[in-house]
Structures are given as C-alpha cells and as structure tokens.
Image (cartoon, rainbow, N blue to C red):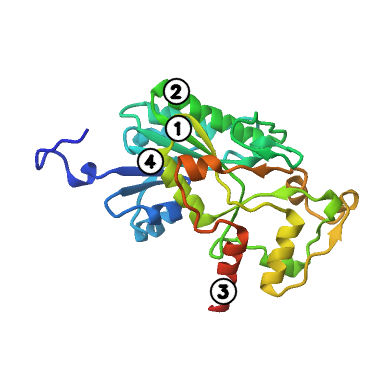
Amino acid sequence: MYATRPGALPSRFRRTRVLIVGCGDVGLRVAQALPPRVRVIALTSSAERKAQLRARGITPLTGDLDQPDTLRRLAGLGQRVIHLAPPPGQGWGDPRTLALTRALRRRSKPVAVVYGSTSGVYGDCQGALVDETRAPGADSPRAQRRLAAENAMRFLGRSANLRASILRIPGIYAVDRVDGTPRARLQKGTPVLQAADDVYTNHIQADDLARACLAALWRGKPQRIYNVNDDTCLKMGDYFDLAADLYGLARPPRVPRDTAKDKLPLLLLSFMSESRRMDNTRLTQELRLRLRYPTVREGLVAIDLSLRDL
C-alpha cells in the first residue's frame, strides 16, 4: 500500500492517517487514545478551534459540512474516518452526512469509516432487550435524521467497497464532560418518573465510547451495527437514586407520567417516553472491547472520587 523506498513519500504520508469529522468531546478522546504513530486530522469550521486542535497534536482542516464545496480536500486524506458530527437540528434527512460521503468517494477511498449514531433509532421498545438485528422504530424527527445518516454511511460502505461501522450510542457520561454527570440535575431537584411509569435507560462512559470507536475502526465488520453501551440494567429513576446515594445528595422526587409534562422540559420528556435494554454482545465479543467502566456504579464511583480530589 505504501512505498518502501526511502524518500519515496514525505513521512507525513507514510503514517496512518485518521480523519475525525465532528471532533468535539468524544473526538478529542479518540485522538488522545490513538498511538503517536498515527497522524490525526480533524475537520473544523471554526478558525478559533485550530489552535486548540494543534495543541492536542491534531492537524486541523478547515471545512463545513453545511457547505459541500469546502469538503474537496477530504478526498483521499484519511485512510480511516470517524464521523461524529450530528445532523442538522431540523428536517428529515442528514445533508451533512450525504455531503461527507460524496467527498470521501472522490479518490483514494478510506478503508474504514465509523459513524456515531444514537440508540434513539430503536424508538420505544417497551423495556425489551434490544440487539442490533431489531428493526429501527425511529418515531421522532431527531432519530429519523440519525437513521438517514446511518443508511447513507452503510450505502457508502456497500457501493464503495469499504468497511462502514455504525455505533448506536445511548447516554454518555464523564466527569470532564459538559453536563456529564447527574450531579447538577440532582442538585436542582429535577423529578423523575414514579416506579410504575419509569423507563429503562442505557449508558456509556465517554472514554469507553472513544475506545469503542477505535475498536470498530480497526476491527469492525463491513456495514455492521454495534450497540455501544455498558452492562448496566437500571430504570432511569433508579439510576438517579444510585447517583444521589453516591454523591450524598437527596434522591429526586418521583412524579406520575400524567403530571410530568407540567414539571419537565420537552427534551427530557422525550427521553422518558422510550424504554429499552440494549444488548452489547457484539461490542464485547466481536469488537473484543473490555469496558473500563462496565456499569454506571463503577463510573460514578470513579467520578465521585475524582471530584473529592478537586
């Protein structure tokens, strides 16, 4: 694949190149987890972020997924690509992902791409155990946009003969992530649903998610979907009770579903309208990922200890 004659190519082109599209919190964790021999390139539309990316050892590349003409330089740039950029906040499709797939086709296509989707594409499963063979039930515009992006990435994989992995991601938590723990919500006393109305919720610690991205990038099967969640099996109210006990805070009040709409924001209510238990067998067996935080208890304990040290 690469020339072996000394001096045949500049050294920067002989290194494996990973392109991160949507290099926010998780993207930065991915970059940090990569070995030094890998050259990391990140697409950014913000001139102000270039210095931050360079400080992390990442090469910034200016481009905007909302302006396809700015993506021409992506062609042939990354041998492996991680796409973590969200769809637009409105509409039914994802023109950003379509623009990216068209740019990646132009020449020297990557060998593998990974797309970070959402577990919301399953819709409400009424508490059932869900593996990747379950048909999507996306019934919100947000989830439908994500499903459209998944389909575009899998089509790229099939038609361009490359490996496309889809990661279906639930709630992400971490102490060093904005709103990455339940602490602030507990301190506000935000209610949760009463036990009879409660829903199952799923989680993944941010560093474990970054490691899952890399496992899929190198070991993912072609056009394969992976649930990326830990082993926790808790309803949402029980999760907040657990966090409250670990933090030494009051447990949140419980309210019936029929009055929750008067006390909770719409976005939070939307999460409380879906219940599922995600099966992560493919993640742990096929991608051979050993979770550092196998349940939220381990993750929240680690978070709590780190906060005490601040």
Give whichever of discs 2 and 4 has the lower sequence position: 2
Residue to which mark 3 is pinned: 305
Residue 6 horizontal side relative to residue 210, left or right: left
Mark whose residue sits in front, 3 or 1: 3
What number is the disc on residue 164? 1
Q: Secondary structure at mark 4?
A: helix
Q: Secondary structure at mark 1?
A: strand
**Residue 292 visible within the image:** yes
Residue to which mark 2 is pinned: 158
Q: Furthest residue to the bottom?
A: 309
Circle 3: residue type:
Leu
Quadrant in which residue 101 is drawn: top left
Mark whose residue sits in front, 2 or 4: 4
Mark whose residue sits in front, 3 or 2: 3
Residue 293 horizontal side relative to residue 39, left or right: right
Q: Tell me how far mark 2 sits from mark 1, CA to CA.
A: 8 Å
Give whichever of discs 3 and 2 has the lower sequence position: 2
**Residue 24 visible within the image:** no
Circle 2: residue type:
Arg
Disc 1 crowd rating (10 Å Cα; few below 14, some 14-19, many 20+) is many
In contact (CB < 8 Å): disc 2 and disc 1 = yes
For image coordinates 42% across by 45% down, the residue present is 215
> Can you say which quadrant of the picture contains the C terminus?
bottom right
Residue to which mark 4 is pinned: 218
For image coordinates 56% across by 56% down, the residue present is 294
